[in-house]
Image: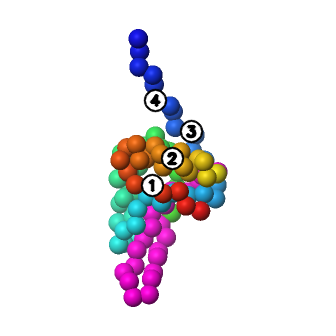
Amino acid sequence: MTAAAAPAAPPAATTGRFMVQLAAVGSEDGARSEWDRLSRRAPELFEGRRAVVQKLERDGQATLYRLRAAGFPDPEAAQDFCQQMRAKNFACIPVR
């Protein structure tokens, strides 16, 4: 008896208005480094995805840089990606 193979990741879409947030860090370089780290640890999930770094400034608080992956065609695809990321013990939140 053989073990069932893990389901293959759906093909990545390079377009789509839905994103997932992967991290919020203190610098743009830190966000890009985190993208590199995550994409090396789970290359099958990041193939065809593109990084989006968004600067977030709040009155009187430190500036953060959100790291997001873009290109999900619908909320379900973003949710599926996050489930696969969480299964690998990575943070992931679907966002619009």
Horizontal side of 87 relative to 77 (left or right) equals: left
- Residue 73: % across, % down: 64, 51
- For disc 3, the marked residue is 10
Sooner in the amino-acid sequence: mark 3 or mark 2: 3
Sooner in the amino-acid sequence: mark 1 or mark 4: 4
Which one is nearer the viewer's eye here, 11 or 23?
23
Secondary structure of the residue carrying tag 3 is loop
Whole-angstrom CA distance, mark 3 to mark 2, is 9 Å
Horizontal side of 29 relative to 57 (left or right) equals: left
Residue type beneath disc 3: Pro
State the residue at coordinates (40%, 43%): 87
Q: Is residue 17 above or below residue 62?
A: above
Whole-angstrom CA distance, mark 1 to mark 4, is 20 Å
Question: Are circles 1 and 3 on residues that touch, CB within 8 Å?
Answer: no
- For disc 4, the marked residue is 6
- For disc 2, the marked residue is 81
Which one is nearer the viewer's eye here, 71 or 59?
59
Q: Image quarter for residue 71?
A: bottom right
Secondary structure of the residue carrying tag 4 is loop
Q: Mark 1 or mark 3, which is nearer to you?
A: 1
Residue type beneath disc 1: Cys
- Residue 30: % across, % down: 35, 66
Res 27 visible: yes
Residue type beneath disc 4: Ala
Which residues, given as a range, are shown in magenta? Answer: 53-73
- For disc 1, the marked residue is 92
